[in-house]
Image (spheres, rainbow, N blue to C red):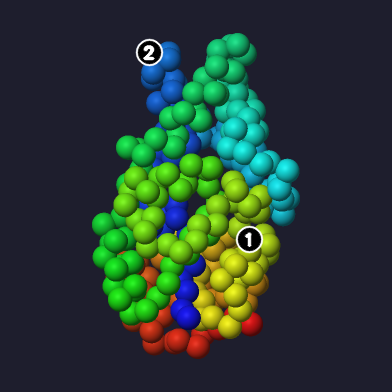
Amino acid sequence: MKYLIWDFDGTLGYRAGMWTGTLLEVLHRDMPGHGYTAEEIHPHLQDGFPWHAPDLSHPEIESAGEWWDAMDQVFERAFGAMGVEPDRAGLLAQRVRDLYPLPEYWQLFDDTIPALRALSSRGWEHVILSNHVPELGSILHALGIDEFFTHVFNSADTGYEKPHPQAFANVVDTIGPDHTLWMIGDNIDTDIRGASRSGIPGILVRTRHPDAPHSCADLMELPAIVDAIPSCGTSS
């Protein structure tokens, strides 16, 4: 069989503002007239997330609540660094977990569904391999694309972030060896280089990089690439 392994965030869909925008929205809701800006928040969110240390696995985190509990420390630190008093910073941090996964904040790129349909019609099966929040499955369902995917591998569930080799091994172990595989993503390090180290070729999308053997700006260009080199992604 033929499988396409998809990144989600930045590849198939996106949340405007991402984490910085979420913390800013929390401030707007709880501290009207606060005066903080996205530029002030962003530097305080550059470490502490599990994908900032992908060499470290976290299989001990077994529930969505435990995952968000660990993230509360990151958000509380960020609010505190901007001058929010400690008690309020702790309360604001807990509001982030409620706001970030809300489906109404998530959108698909215009070419996502047409590309998935076109590739499916050519016999390609789809799986997702994403560094994401525990609610990824609910987001996919709300966006109407969960039906395209036979499996969803989410780091919040597995405990392994791309580009950790086990993240890719989980996919191969589940679908079985001897399939044609491609990794599709927008990040040269986590998606393309990570997959390559596991013997899976990748296609960089929505951006260009000199180290990417294959790339395209639009997902509708993918069929021409994956169908032209069918043996490139065989894993055994």
According to the picture, the residue beneath numbered tag 1 turns out to be 167
Classify 159 as above or below 226: above
Query: Alpha-carbon neighbours of circle 1 within 10 Å: few (<14), some, or many (≥20)?
Result: many
As rendered, which of 177 and 183 lies closer to the eye? 177
Residue 203: image location, x then y, percent: 46, 72
Classify 14 as above or below 103: below
As rendered, which of 10 and 147 lies closer to the eye? 147
Residue 150: image location, x then y, percent: 46, 64
Q: Residue at (39%, 50%) from the top-left corner?
A: 140
Q: Please state if 28 lies on the left or on the right of 3 as rendered.
A: left
Say whether residue 187 is visible: no
Mark linked to residue 54: none
Q: Please state if 193 lies on the left or on the right of 98 as rendered.
A: right
**In the rendered structure, which disc, 2 or 1, sits on the residue that comes first in sequence?**
2
Say whether residue 169 is visible: yes
Kindly report the distance in space between the C-alpha atoms of the residues bearing marks 2 and 1.
43 Å
As rendered, which of 59 and 26 lies closer to the eye? 59
Residue 13: image location, x then y, percent: 37, 52
Q: Residue at (50%, 88%) from the top-left corner?
A: 231
Q: Residue at (37%, 62%) from the top-left corner?
A: 148
**Contact (CB < 8 A) between labels 2 and 1?**
no
Amino acid at the residue labelled 1: Ala
Look at the numbered disc 1 and give the secondary structure of its residue: helix
Classify 128 as above or below 64: below
